[in-house]
Image (cartoon, rainbow, N blue to C red):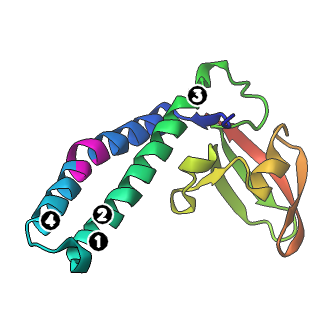
Amino acid sequence: MSQIVYFTEEGLQKLKDELHFLKTKERPSISKQIAEARDKGDLSENAEYDAAKEAQGLLELKISKLEETLQNARVVDESQLDTSKVLILCKVTIKNVKNGQKMTYMLVPENEADLKSGKISVNSPIAKGLLGKKKGEQAEVTVPNGKMTFEIVDIAR
């Protein structure tokens, strides 16, 4: 049995768009490449044909994995989330107790994490340490460098 994967509405739509693109654009393109390579003659020594068949296999694998992910996808209902504590899809501002540095992160499903845009996975060590905490509480987080203590400064949606 496959594991349920949580998405935001936006993240689920991106996944659906990618699957649609692979099926409607990439798949016909690779089929065309195979047909062109096949027309060039002897398949036993045709590197172009082999490469196209390999690309087709990889594409079909990617499509099947995306389809499986979509079958197990669930959208997180933001309206049902408690805003008094740190949960998935909240934007949390934390302060490093040791150096006073403030950081703001949005906790998102693992497949939507993007550190450059301030989105961290709920499965990351920092997020795991923050989950369930309320504004003003401190969270001790174990990171690769050791233990860090953060204070929850603000929680927003």
- Badge 1: few (under 14), some or many (20 or more) residues near its Cα, within 10 Å? some
Q: Residue at x 50, y 46 (%)?
A: 65
Of the two numbered discs 3 and 4 in the rendering, the one whose residue sits closer to the viewer: 4
Q: Which of marks 4 and 2 is nearer the N terminus?
A: 4
* Place of residue 126 in the rendered image (x, y in percent of width and height, measured from the top left): 78, 56
Q: Which of marks 3 and 4 is nearer the N terminus?
A: 4
Q: Earlier in the sequence, mark 3 or mark 2?
A: 2
* Place of residue 67 in the rendered image (x, y in percent of width and height, measured from the top left): 46, 37
Apparent side of residue 132 relative to residue 56 in the rendered image (left or right): right
Residue sitting nearer the eye, 39 or 110: 39
- The residue that mark 4 highlights is 38
Magenta segment range?
Answer: 22-27
- The residue that mark 1 highlights is 50
Cα distance, mark 1 to mark 2? 5 Å
**Is residue 25 inside the magenta stretch?**
yes
- The residue that mark 2 highlights is 53
Cα distance, mark 4 to mark 2? 10 Å
Q: Residue at x 41, y 46 (%)?
A: 63
Quarter of the figure with residue 109: top right
Query: Could you tell me which secondary element the residue under label 3 belongs to?
Result: strand
Cα distance, mark 1 to mark 3? 38 Å
Residue sitting nearer the eye, 71 or 104: 71
- The residue that mark 3 highlights is 74
Where 32 falls versus 15 (above or below)? below
Apparent side of residue 38 relative to residue 134 in the rendered image (left or right): left
Q: What residue type is labelled 4?
A: Arg
Cα distance, mark 3 to mark 4? 42 Å
Q: Which amino acid does label 3 sit on?
A: Arg
